[in-house]
């Protein structure tokens, strides 16, 4: 059935549940998984001409810490299930595009992702990035709710 499953994760509770589901599916299919997390690029933040004092180095360090934690969750789940797992951390301002590009680059034949991540009001019903992946992907997408 499936040979290589891409599992994007942001480390949230719902994302962790999708990870566990994706890893179990991979185990049952004899597939390998690639875990992906996407960090947003550094932007200088300002509010009414007052700069927010978060430097690029501090932002990158915190972003990497969060990404590493999300990837570690997938690696641990895959190891416990006996599933081969690679990990990727991308920095991209369009997460949906990074997900689709990674799936193509790694020759994945399925994307398993949560129904929403941390994208604010637009994520109330179905996450905006999830909708964009569903809309633009030519690779099958399984949405975990």
Image (cartoon, rainbow, N blue to C red):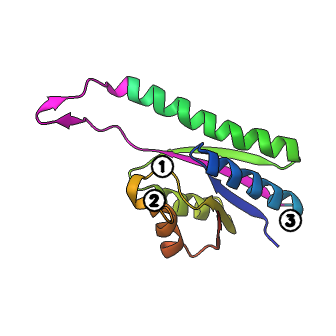
Quadrant position of the N terminus in the picture = bottom right
Q: Earlier in the sequence, mark 2 or mark 1?
A: 1
Q: Please tell me whether mark 1 or mark 3 is closer to you in this view.
A: 1
Image coords of residue 142 (percent x, y): 66, 68
Q: CA distance from mark 2 to mark 1?
A: 7 Å
Q: CA distance from mark 1 to mark 3?
A: 30 Å
Left or right, 10 with reference to 144: left
* Residue under label 3: 29
Q: Earlier in the sequence, mark 1 or mark 3?
A: 3
Question: Residue at horizontal 66%, vertical 44%?
Answer: 87
Question: Can residue 97 be seen in this snapshot?
Answer: no
Q: Earlier in the sequence, mark 2 or mark 3?
A: 3
Is 36 magenta? The answer is yes
Q: CA distance from mark 2 to mark 3?
A: 31 Å
**Badge 1: how crowded within 10 Å, few (<14), some, or many (20+)?**
some
SS for tag 1?
loop
Image coords of residue 121 (percent x, y): 39, 56
Query: What is the residue that sits farthest to the left in this orientation?
Result: 49
Question: Residue at horizontal 60%, vertical 62%?
Answer: 103
Q: Is residue 74 above or below residue 103?
A: above
Give the magenta-colored segment's residue range: 31-57
Is 40 magenta? The answer is yes
Left or right, 31 with reference to 92: right
Q: Are marks 2 and 1 in contact (CB under 8 Å)?
A: yes
Q: Is residue 88 above or below residue 2?
A: above
* Residue under label 2: 123
């Amino acid at each position: 059935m499936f040979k290589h499953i891409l599992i994007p994760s942001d480390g949230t509770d719902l994302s962790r549940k999708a990870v566990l589901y994706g890893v179990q599916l991979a185990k049952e299919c004899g597939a390998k998984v690639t875990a992906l997390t996407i960090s947003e690029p550094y932007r200088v933040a300002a509010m009414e001409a007052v700069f927010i004092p978060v430097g690029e180095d501090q932002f990158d360090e915190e972003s990497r810490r969060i990404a590493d934690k999300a990837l570690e969750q997938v690696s641990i789940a895959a190891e416990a299930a006996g599933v081969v797992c690679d990990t990727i951390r991308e920095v991209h301002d369009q997460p949906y595009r990074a997900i689709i590009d990674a799936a193509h680059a790694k020759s994945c034949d399925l994307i398993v992702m949560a129904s929403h991540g941390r994208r604010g009001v637009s994520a109330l019903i179905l996450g905006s990035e999830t909708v964009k992946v569903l809309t633009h992907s030519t690779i099958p997408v399984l949405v975990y709710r």
